[in-house]
């Protein structure tokens, strides 16, 4: 009964049935031919390659804007804003990228921006912009689940549809849009040309990555509820066999509940984009001093942080090296326990 009650609360907050998504596009972002040419030039120059030297953990500040009606009602509830941050940090931990909320939630009370048709996106992304952060605007409804920005986009920031944000059935759209912000493309991208199933052209076609499978565009019609590819499409190139895409990749259009991983190449590209292109745009001091025991970044130190740290510790993740000696061992676990017991 409690679970059903929670579902009803979440559904009411969205204005849609739980798990129901907006008609229209999954993602509103498209790369223009001019942008594509710049990205290919960067690719050839190695801008998106492995950065030289150590790869420290970066904590990137986010500004969370919640759009409400003009009378102050509606809007994404604070607990779902917090969950969106948790979803982002869960998804991006393996890339050595984490996020903090830079200050309190900022509310925009506007009937004109509460439900947007798409034409209002530009006006919204020019409203209450906080420099030095990734600005996120949560709206009641939009014709897409989310829209983000490449480094080359004229409009910066991410707009999220509440009905696609931090739900039990959708933890993946927000990390997906952040992926675009760090110059990741859809796995079915065709702006650079169509990728062969054999990946013989994977550095210059598709999503420009060779460790993501060619993708004919996934959907609920070709991905089963068991998260399996059930399509029969044949590859576009001579000698190609059938497609074998990955339904788990965050940057696909797979079922939202199936997407839970970035490939190593995607993590490298995103990290390189952060270090080589975007780093100077952020005011990292907004995330400092970090509360290192708040492992999921939701602003509260609780047992969920302990469980999440323990997972990273057991996996030997570099972020779990709290004492900075280059080794994840029992001393790091003791350090975390000291921080946890101190509440920060």
Image (cartoon, rainbow, N blue to C red):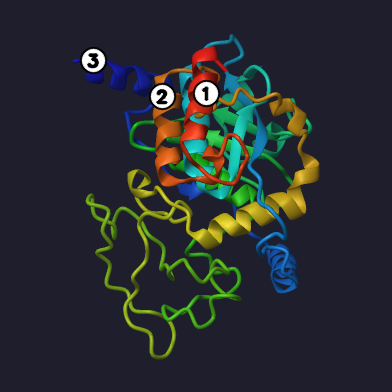
For mark 2, give the secondary structure.
helix
| Residue 201 left/right relative to 271 | left
**Residue 2: image tag:** 3
Give how far across and how far down residue 28 sits, in percent. 56, 48
Q: Earlier in the sequence, mark 2 or mark 1?
A: 1
Seen as rendered, the residue at the extreme bottom is 238
Residue 232 vertical placement versus 124 (above, below): below
Q: On the rendered image, what quadrant is the C terminus found in?
A: top right
For mark 3, give the secondary structure.
helix
Residue at numbered disc 1:
298
Residue nearest the viewer, comparing 108 with 276: 276
Q: Are dots 2 and 1 in contact, CB under 8 Å?
A: yes
Q: Earlier in the sequence, mark 3 or mark 2?
A: 3
Give how far across and how far down residue 267 sits, in percent. 56, 55
Residue 257 vertical placement versus 48 (above, below): above
| Label 3 crowd bin: few (<14), some (14–19), many (20+), radius 10 Å | few
| Label 2 crowd bin: few (<14), some (14–19), many (20+), radius 10 Å | some
Residue 105 vertical placement versus 308 (above, below): above
For mark 1, give the secondary structure.
loop
| Label 1 crowd bin: few (<14), some (14–19), many (20+), radius 10 Å | many
Which of labels 3 and 1 is toward the front? 1
Q: Earlier in the sequence, mark 3 or mark 1?
A: 3
Which residue does the image show at 72% across and 51% down from the upper left? 275
Residue at numbered disc 2:
304
Residue nearest the viewer, comparing 217 with 180: 180
What is the distance, in whole Å, between disc 2 and disc 1 at their CAs?
Answer: 10 Å
Give how far across and how far down residue 115 sits, in percent. 54, 28
Q: Quadrant of residue 20?
A: top left
Q: On the rendered image, what quadrant is the N terminus found in?
A: top left
Q: Are dots 3 and 2 in contact, CB under 8 Å?
A: no
Give how far across and how far down residue 257 sits, in percent. 34, 43
Residue nearest the viewer, comparing 159 with 308: 308
């Amino acid at each position: 009964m409690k679970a059903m009650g929670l579902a009803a609360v979440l559904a009411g907050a969205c204005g849609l049935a739980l798990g129901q998504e907006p008609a229209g596009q999954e993602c509103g972002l498209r790369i223009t031919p001019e942008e594509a040419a710049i990205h290919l030039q960067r690719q050839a120059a190695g801008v998106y390659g492995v950065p030289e030297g150590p790869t420290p953990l970066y904590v990137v500040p986010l500004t969370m804007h919640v759009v409400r009606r003009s009378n102050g009602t509606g809007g994404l509830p604070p607990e779902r804003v917090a969950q969106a941050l948790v979803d982002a940090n869960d998804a991006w931990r393996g890339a050595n990228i984490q996020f903090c909320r830079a200050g309190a939630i900022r509310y925009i009370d506007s009937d004109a921006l509460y439900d947007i048709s798409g034409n209002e996106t530009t006006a919204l992304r020019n409203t209450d912009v906080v420099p030095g952060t990734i600005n996120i605007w949560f709206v009641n409804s939009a014709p897409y689940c989310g829209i983000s920005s490449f480094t080359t986009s004229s409009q910066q920031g991410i707009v999220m549809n509440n009905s696609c944000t931090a739900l039990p059935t959708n933890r993946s759209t927000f990390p997906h849009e952040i992926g675009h912000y760090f110059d990741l493309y859809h796995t079915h991208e065709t702006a650079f040309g169509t990728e062969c199933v054999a990946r013989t052209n994977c550095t210059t076609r598709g999503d420009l990555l060779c460790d993501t499978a060619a993708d004919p565009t996934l959907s609920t019609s070709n991905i089963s509820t068991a998260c399996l590819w059930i399509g029969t499409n044949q590859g576009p190139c001579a000698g190609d066999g059938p497609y074998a895409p990955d339904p788990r990749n965050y940057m696909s259009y797979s079922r939202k509940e199936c997407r839970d991983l970035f490939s190593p190449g995607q993590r490298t590209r995103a990290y390189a984009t952060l270090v080589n292109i975007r780093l100077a745009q952020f005011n990292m001091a907004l995330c400092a001093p970090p509360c290192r025991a708040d492992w999921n970044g939701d602003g509260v130190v609780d047992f969920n942080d302990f469980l999440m740290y323990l997972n990273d510790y057991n996996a030997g993740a570099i972020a779990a090296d709290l004492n900075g000696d280059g080794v994840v061992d029992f001393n790091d676990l003791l350090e975390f326990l000291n921080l946890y017991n101190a509440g920060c």
